Amino acid sequence: MDDPAFATETDTTTQSILLAASNHDLLALKPFLRVPGAASVQDPETDDIEAAKATIKELFLSGAIWNDLDTNNETPGCLAWRLGRKELYELVVDAGVRAEILMNLMGGYEELSDEDEDEDEEGSEVEGMGIIENVETIVDGENTTTEETAEEATNGQAGETKEEGTEIPKKDVNSADYLRSKLEFADDKLLDADANGVMMAWETSIMQRTVNLLIPASSPPLRILNIGFGMGIIDTMFASTSPASHHIIEAHSDVLTHLQTPGHKFGKRMGSLRTRRRKL
């Protein structure tokens, strides 16, 4: 058809320049650069954030590694954050959370009994903020106790493994061994005696999202119980919501000692309820 009204003109100069540059093809690139301004052309589709998000989602669904390193030792999340692409960074965080959940499921998990959950909620309540130290077990409002100590439970599990004779039990980071281990505090991390991360500063954004989901801005003051203080990242966020009550159960002596250091932001404003160890 020779009708000029239906004629199409497609200028591929910009795409050709970018393609030659990405391929480091100097012979193809130099003729284009003779035109003033050609060295600073941009692909108008490069900044389509929605297309980029769709591409990243497809890559992750197809098995892309969320924390893989490039030649500059950067992960996809590092790169997105450095370039100010917050939406893309959030996609990488989501992929990391999914990967961790999947790994935990594949490695097995221990279900916590909740048969006394309703009774616990109906037990006595203490308003304000406090830390319960040296907790061997959680007892309900009627002071009922369990008939098994942590040591007996550990020995029982070891016995079962020996009987099966199929595998060597993995070290349990939630066991009495962890509570006896020495913790190392730093500005951006909390490590156990084996240099395993107990808590890391990079988890802050994940914790903040958790708090935002648990306590929306429209929520009334809530009663909060958190198990494990660690570096106090999420408890600082909980405290900022002005809860009706805020209780923390922390069993590790090093964390409790750290809380008592002069100038600690939680040390002065949080009461301390010391409970003596019970042999159940």
Image: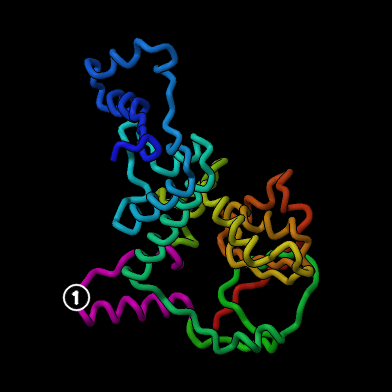
Residue 67: x percent and y percent?
37, 47
Tell me the SS state at disc 1: loop
The image quarter in which residue 128 lies = bottom right
Q: Residue at x 36, y 29 (%)?
A: 11
> Looking at the figure, which quarter contains the N terminus?
top left
Q: Is residue 248 above or below residue 166?
A: above
Number of marks present in the image shown: 1
* Residue topped by disc 1: 166
What residue is shown at x 47% (from left), y 42% (from top)? 48
Pick the residue in front: 69 or 48. 48
Magenta segment: does it hold 12?
A: no
Colouring convention used in this rendered image of the protein: rainbow
Q: Amino acid at mark 1?
A: Thr
Picture layout, residue 41 above or below residue 37? below
Q: Nearer the viewer, residue 250 or 63?
A: 63
Q: Which residues are magenta?
A: 149-177
Vertical order, 44 against 26 (above or below): below
Q: Please provide percent x and percent y for residue 118.
A: 64, 88
- Give the image location of residue 34, x and y in percent: 35, 10
Which residue is rendered at x = 78% and y = 55% of the image?
269
Residue 202 at what x, y percent from top left?
Answer: 51, 47
Q: Residue 152 vs residue 126: left or right?
A: left
Compared with 130, 11 (above or below) is above
- Quadrant that contains the C terminus: bottom right
Task: Please tell me which residue lies in front, 88 or 118.
Answer: 88
